[in-house]
Amino acid sequence: MAKLLICLTLIVISSLSMGLPSSTYARKTGPPAPDSTDEKELWIQNISFDGKQRRVTIHFYVQDLLAGENKTVHEVARASITADSPSDFGQVRVLDDLVTVGPDYHSTPVARAQGLITYADLQVAALAMNMNFFFTAGIFNGSTICILGRNQINLPERELAVAGGTGFFRNAAGYAITKLYSYDAEKEYGVLEYTLYLTLPGSSPRMVAATGIHADV
């Protein structure tokens, strides 16, 4: 049960990976490629602009590989009580997960989820998360969004804080909703769904170009 708990937890963080080239990496670690992909799916949308602030929604999936030769989540530390804790209290893991447009591992890669997750509740499985979404897709390449907060993995949906960002997402504020999309217990492979609701300052020409929405919309 402890092993399954760890797996589900790691899935929650998920981890929007963007450091490795997509196609080669996917063939090495993911399930067989599907007949079709979601290459054209719109994963970032401009919702509104009031002349001062722009509201943007970002939706994607984190591929959480907890086992195997190419796993992307690794334990780096644990407390003296972790082995006997019902909530794995004190375990620390580092991750570098692939982030994709769709739930399939071979769909278009847009980022990587990189950071630390710590089991930080003595009673229930809850993570203290310190994670960056490092974007690698198109004009967003090199930009980041920082996610912080408490992630209680047994809840159907969890809310995390957007603490800031860089590049296109400089001075971003808002929140993220995450939930488990799927989990293969045999392969210890989970897919996490993330939706980010951001507020960005100003009318950045780069963001206008990215979303196709101008200040007068």
Image (tube, rainbow, N blue to C red):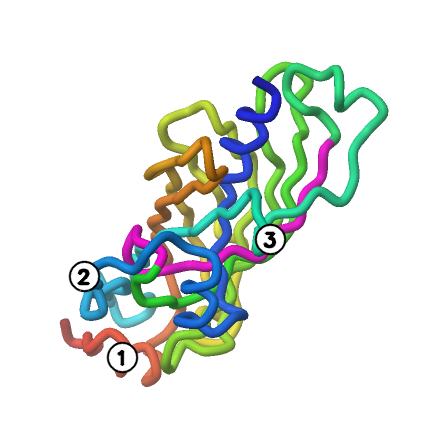
Q: Which mark is residue 69?
A: 3
Describe residue 52's horizontal placement relative to residue 160 as left or right.
left
Quadrant that contains the N terminus: top right
Q: Residue beneath label 2, please?
A: 35
How crowded pointer 3 is (Cα within 10 Å; few <14, some 14-19, many 20+) is rated as few
Magenta region, main secondary structure = strand
Q: Residue beneath label 1, please?
A: 208
The local secondary structure at tag 2 comes to loop
Residue 49: x %, y % from top left: 24, 67
Looking at the image, which residue is at 51% across and 43% down? 13
Q: Is residue 11 above or below residue 174?
A: above
Q: Which mark is residue 134?
A: none
| Residue segment shown in magenta | 91-105
Give the amino acid at mark 2.
Answer: Asp
**Residue 48 seen from this side:** no
Foreground mark, 2 or 1, reads 2
Q: Is residue 172 above or below residue 91?
A: below
Does label 2 or label 1 sit earlier along the sequence?
2
Mark 2–mark 1 CB contact (< 8 Å): no
Give the amino acid at mark 1.
Answer: Val
Give the amino acid at mark 3.
Answer: Glu
- Is residue 104 highlighted in magenta? yes
